[in-house]
Image (cartoon, rainbow, N blue to C red):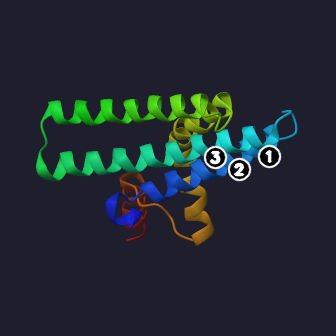
Amino acid sequence: MLRRLNKVLPELVAAIIIYGLAAWLAGIWFVRDKLMFSTGLFIGICLAVGMAVHMAVVLEDAVSAGSSQSKLVAMSLLRYVAVVLVFFCTVYFHLGDPIAAFAGVMGLKIAAYVQPFFHKILLKLQGREEFSIKNHEINNQTEEVRK
């Protein structure tokens, strides 16, 4: 389902989840309240995944339907309002550690930077080579020299 929406989205979500696991494994040893840390980080990671999916839906809608600039701005503001509401509920109802939740939300940023490297690793593991114009031109030149 995610691949139908955007071909990079499953890799981005996987990178967010891997980041979340790494942050949990690194941070769980240094906090006093392990449950609050874990739930806060889980809330942040879920929020990051939700934001990534929402961005993909909005971008797909903008490209296919030609949405207006004001609708794109409204959807961005809706995302940020959702983040503020989730953080408010997390703090008000003591659902988790807000700093851990913030670290979880930052997983979206980290995953966006790491995704190209993650993509290359996945291609190597699958035994495929990414097609690029530069590689194609080099291969064509090599074939011409051989002729």
Please give the label number shown on residue 145. none
Residue identified by numbered label 1: 25
At which x and y percent is residue 99? Answer: 66, 28
- How many residues crowd mark 1 within 10 Å: few (<14), some (14–19), many (20+)? few
Q: Residue at image x 36%, y 47%? A: 54
Q: Residue at image x 16%, y 53%? A: 64
Image marks 3 and 1: residues in contact by CB distance under 8 Å: no
- How many residues crowd mark 2 within 10 Å: few (<14), some (14–19), many (20+)? some
| Mark closer to the observer (3, 1) | 3
Alpha-carbon distance for marks 2 and 3?
9 Å
Image marks 2 and 1: residues in contact by CB distance under 8 Å: yes
Taking 68 as reference, is 6 above or below it?
below
Viewer-nearest residue: 76 or 132: 76
Mark found first going from the N terminus, 3 or 1: 1
Viewer-nearest residue: 50 or 92: 92
Q: Quadrant of the N terminus?
A: bottom left
Image marks 2 and 3: residues in contact by CB distance under 8 Å: no
Residue flagged by tag 2: what amino acid is it? Answer: Leu
Q: What element carries label 1?
A: helix
Figure quadrant of residue 4:
bottom left
Viewer-nearest residue: 109 or 71: 71
Q: In which quarter of the image is the C terminus?
A: bottom left
Residue flagged by tag 3: what amino acid is it? Answer: Phe
Alpha-carbon distance for marks 2 and 1?
6 Å
Viewer-nearest residue: 19 or 40: 40
| Mark closer to the observer (2, 3) | 3
Taking 93 as reference, is 116 above or below it?
below
Query: Seen from this angle, which residue lies furthest front?
Result: 93
Residue identified by numbered label 3: 42
Residue identified by numbered label 2: 21
